[in-house]
Image (cartoon, helix red, strand yellow):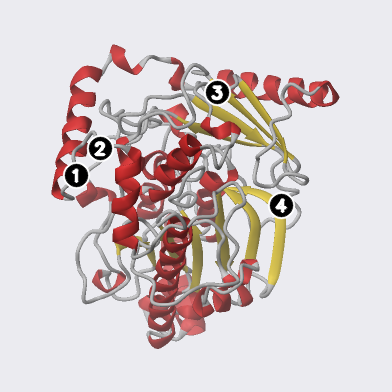
């Protein structure tokens, strides 16, 4: 036991340390807190790297380009799911959505997270951070999209909607949500003559008009990013703030959102931290959105639980050797697809090969004009693609260097049999090791008949608001799209 005088001196030590610390930091408790870096996640809905800083021509993204020039740009970053609620469930927990049971889009059987599944918001709150979720504007104090597939209360999951609500000097962790380029798109006011359209899309006036609106929506996103960066500068906190910009999953187009091709998974990812992250760096390592949580925690000096993600700021790390992703039911399109990606190859397993790639999806039929273009041109016999088949192969394999748009399936090629088997085994192991809950039939816990009826009612009501019969033909529907987009097809 310590002697009373020793105990008295030991009790006094924290005050001596605090006085010393205050003299170093300028004399106020607030300045001590200010030493902790702030963190801002800027999350864009439905975004592939169609940005100037990623080399995409014609689109004007000066603010995001500036962010990239001031930080590190990751060229090969991917979501774990091609739809928002599943992907967001993953990067908020740092676990695969299939592990925590949040794999179905807008799941009807919300899991309760176990104690060994902490969230990034909870850990940052425990570390003293003010955690908020908004639109990055003090004038819009309204809780923004979170869209998570587990049980949570937004009022406690976040402390507020804007970092202006924090206590004086308190470090903040702000998640800023930007809708664009989620559909419905803004209307383009100019053409993009040099902007390439993916070669797996048919060249059609509707295709070009819809793509132009997508790019125009990206330009709106860029303006909003610029507003956030300007605010950080004006408030004098930019130098002590880590900004992480990323898309929650890929683009809202056919073969993009809700598919496991790179169009649905490849996202931009940029990290800026003045003085800590080297400016103008291009990082080609395989990165996952699962990496955002451990990167954030490490930067904030918060202990990191055991997670599948990596700290992106660890320059000694070689990155991931393989990246896994999953797609399960989206709306009224039940499915189960798993994929694994390496630097050079993508393997996809379709657990329901009897269903077509273009199986009925009310969301996509209502929102993706290109889907109707494909169906009409295919029926006319003027455009074809394996994607239009009535069934799918059980397995798909793509050489991503030779075929970056994943158009030529090599799964049946003897030349690639060894690679196919390697990646097939990798998926098998991942399913087992991560406890993939997609193996459980959703109908065991959810009234699927009622769910499908609800989706059909929504679809029919939306079509009727458009002045269309819900069962209108593809030809008639294409005419409607042409009118909406203000274009005329070549046969008119």
Residue displayed at 68% across by 24% down: 426
Residue displayed at 63% across by 49% down: 287
> Which label's residue is closer to the chain start, 1 or 4?
4
- Using the image, tell me which numbered label, if any, was put on residue 392: 3
Determine which quarter of the picture holds residue 385.
top right
CB within 8 Å, label 3 to label 2: no
Q: Position of residue 437 (x, y in %)?
A: 44, 21
CB within 8 Å, label 1 to label 4: no
| Secondary element type, mark 2 | loop
Instruction: Look at mark 1 in the image and give the residue it sits on.
Output: 468
Q: Is residue 79 left or right of residue 428?
A: left
Instruction: Look at mark 4 in the image and give the residue it sits on.
Output: 285
Q: Is residue 401 left or right of residue 2?
A: right
Residues packed near mark 1 inside 10 Å, few (<14), some (14 to 19) or many (20 plus): some
Q: Which label lies toward us, 3 or 4?
A: 3
CB within 8 Å, label 2 to label 4: no
> Which label's residue is closer to the chain start, 3 or 4?
4
CA gap, disc 2 and disc 4:
47 Å
CB within 8 Å, label 3 to label 1: no
> Which label's residue is closer to the chain start, 3 or 1?
3
> Which label's residue is closer to the chain start, 3 or 2?
3
CB within 8 Å, label 1 to label 2: yes
CA gap, disc 3 and disc 2:
26 Å
- Using the image, tell me which numbered label, if any, was put on residue 472: 2
């Amino acid at each position: 036991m310590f002697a009373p005088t020793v105990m008295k001196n030991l009790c006094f030590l924290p005050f001596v340390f605090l006085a010393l610390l205050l003299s170093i930091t300028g004399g106020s408790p607030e300045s001590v807190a200010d030493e902790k870096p702030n963190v801002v996640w800027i999350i864009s809905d439905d975004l592939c790297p169609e940005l100037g800083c990623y080399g995409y021509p014609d689109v004007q993204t000066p603010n995001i380009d500036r962010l990239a020039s001031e930080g590190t740009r990751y060229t090969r970053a991917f979501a774990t799911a091609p739809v928002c609620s599943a992907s967001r469930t993953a990067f908020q927990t740092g676990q695969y959505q299939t592990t925590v049971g949040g794999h179905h889009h807008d799941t009807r059987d919300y899991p309760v997270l176990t104690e060994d599944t902490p969230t990034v918001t909870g850990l940052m709150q425990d570390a003293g951070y003010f955690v908020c979720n908004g639109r990055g504007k003090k004038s819009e104090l309204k809780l923004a999209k979170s869209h998570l597939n587990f049980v949570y209360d937004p009022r406690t999951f976040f402390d507020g909607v804007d970092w202006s609500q924090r206590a004086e000097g308190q470090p903040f962790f702000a998640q800023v949500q930007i809708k664009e380029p989620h559909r419905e798109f803004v209307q383009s006011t100019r053409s993009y003559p040099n902007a390439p359209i993916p070669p797996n899309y048919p060249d059609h006036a509707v295709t070009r008009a819809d793509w132009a609106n997508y790019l125009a929506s990206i330009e709106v996103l860029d303006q909003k990013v610029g507003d956030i960066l300007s605010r950080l500068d004006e408030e004098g906190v930019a130098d002590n703030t880590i900004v992480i910009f990323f898309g929650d999953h890929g683009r809202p187009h056919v073969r993009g959102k809700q598919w496991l091709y790179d169009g649905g998974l490849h996202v931009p990812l940029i990290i800026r931290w003045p003085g800590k992250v080297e400016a103008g760096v291009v990082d080609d390592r395989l990165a996952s959105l699962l990496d955002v949580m451990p990167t954030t925690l490490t930067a904030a000096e918060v202990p990191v639980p055991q997670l599948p993600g990596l700290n992106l700021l660890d320059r000694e790390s070689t990155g991931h050797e393989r990246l896994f992703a999953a797609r399960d039911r989206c709306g009224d399109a039940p499915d189960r697809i798993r994929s694994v990606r390496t630097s050079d190859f993508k393997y996809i397993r379709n657990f329901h090969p009897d269903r077509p790639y273009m199986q009925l999806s009310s969301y996509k039929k209502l929102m993706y004009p290109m889907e109707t273009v494909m169906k009409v041109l295919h029926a006319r016999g003027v455009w074809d693609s394996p994607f239009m088949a009535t069934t799918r192969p059980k397995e798909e394999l793509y050489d991503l260097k030779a075929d970056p748009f994943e158009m030529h399936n090599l799964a049946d090629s003897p030349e690639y049999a060894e690679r196919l088997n390697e990646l097939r085994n990798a998926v098998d192991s991942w399913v087992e090791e991560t406890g993939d809950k997609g193996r459980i039939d959703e109908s065991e816990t959810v009234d699927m008949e009622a769910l499908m009826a609800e989706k059909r009612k929504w679809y029919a009501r939306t079509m009727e608001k458009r002045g269309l019969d819900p069962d209108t033909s593809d030809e008639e529907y294409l005419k409607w799209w042409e009118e909406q987009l203000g274009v005329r097809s070549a046969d008119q």
